[in-house]
């Protein structure tokens, strides 16, 4: 059974979110922000007063977090304890907690399980760190976006999301996450052997989106409701 997924992976502020949303809208697919689910777990860990670096306590907490997913507004969304967290997930407190929390195997199992259930909502564009390598290794198309650390810090700083931090503080913050994300034992950030790598440093959002939409076969990928691929499912 092949899930109908386009995977877009890459490090922080490489442009994944904006590009993935646009690709999903252009292709009539649902957008999935897997990082938001990890952020929600980190937010919940903080809210419960658990030290994000205490892997045993985080593991225990993961077993008691209930996340409900649903489709709406062109995306697969989720609620934690009945609430859609929204901008609460973008604070520096969550930024600091999320990578250590996401390195805990029980957290990865929880989120990976949720993500693997999502194709029941329809065809997806899923962005993250390990989508093409670990969550959906059978994805129909895989892209890996990268950009220089300077450019990524500049972009994140330009978003109101980095409110209050200097460019160099933003650079340090995303550098710390990159290091943890790339070195963890389970499903580290890495390039899938069959991914198309796009260096976005000198490209606009439109140019990156265009490259993906023009990639071989992207517009003609078998859809669950059409053709032999549907019967294969
Ligand atoms: O938006 P930004 O690039 O800053 O990060 P994000 O996509 O919201 O992801 C936040 C964090 O979640 C990452 O730094 C990883 O620690 C974790 N993550 C992960 O481990 N695996 C994924 N598939 C997605 C995110």
Image (cartoon, grey):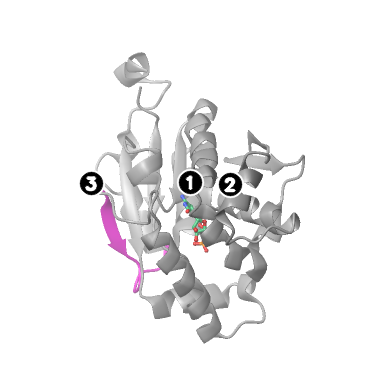
**Chain-order first, disc 1 or disc 3:** 1
**Rendered image quadrant of residue 83:** top right
Q: Secondary structure at mark 3?
A: loop
Relative to 159, say whether 18 is above or below.
Answer: above
Precedes in sequence: disc 1 or disc 2: 2
Q: Main secondary structure of the magenta part?
A: loop
- Residue found at x 55% / y 83%: 169
The quadrant of the image that shows the N terminus is top left
Q: Nearer the viewer, mark 1 or mark 3?
A: 1
Q: Confirm or reject: label 2 Cβ below 8 Å from ligand 1.
A: no
Residue receiving disc 1: 105
Q: Residue at x 52, y 53 (%)?
A: 102
Q: Which mark is residue 180?
A: none
Q: Identify the residue position indicated by label 2 in the image.
A: 59
Report the residue at 32% width, 21% height from top: 229
Cα separation between marks 1 and 3:
25 Å
Q: Which range is magenta?
A: 193-205
Give yes or no for residue 199 being in the magenta stretch.
yes
Q: Which of 40/120 is in front?
A: 40
Badge 1 vs badge 2, beta-carbon distance below 8 Å: yes
* Position in image of residue 140 (x %, y %): 32, 36
Q: Is 201 drawn above or below residue 56 in the view shown?
A: below
Residue, disc 3: 194
| Element under disc 1 | helix
């Amino acid at each position: 059974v092949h899930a109908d997924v386009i995977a877009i992976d890459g490090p922080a502020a490489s442009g994944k979110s904006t590009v993935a949303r646009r690709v999903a809208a252009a292709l009539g697919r649902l957008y999935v922000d897997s990082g938001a689910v990890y952020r929600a777990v980190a937010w919940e860990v903080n809210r419960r007063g658990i030290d994000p670096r205490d892997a045993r306590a985080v593991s225990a907490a993961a077993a008691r977090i209930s996340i409900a997913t649903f489709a709406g507004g062109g995306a697969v969304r989720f609620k934690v304890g009945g609430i859609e967290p929204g901008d609460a997930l973008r604070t520096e407190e969550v930024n600091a907690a999320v990578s250590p929390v996401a390195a805990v195997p029980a957290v990865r199992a929880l989120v990976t399980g949720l993500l693997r259930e999502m194709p029941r909502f329809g065809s997806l564009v899923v962005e993250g760190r390990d989508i093409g390598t670990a969550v959906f290794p059978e994805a129909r198309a895989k892209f890996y976006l990268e950009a220089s650390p300077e450019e990524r810090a500049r972009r994140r700083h330009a978003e109101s999301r980095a409110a209050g931090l200097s460019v160099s503080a933003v650079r340090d913050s995303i550098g710390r996450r990159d290091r943890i994300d790339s070195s963890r034992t389970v499903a580290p950030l890495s390039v899938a052997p069959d991914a198309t790598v796009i260096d976005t440093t000198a490209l606009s959002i439109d140019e990156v989106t265009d490259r993906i939409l023009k990639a071989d076969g992207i517009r003609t990928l078998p859809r669950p409701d059409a053709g032999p691929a549907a019967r294969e499912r």
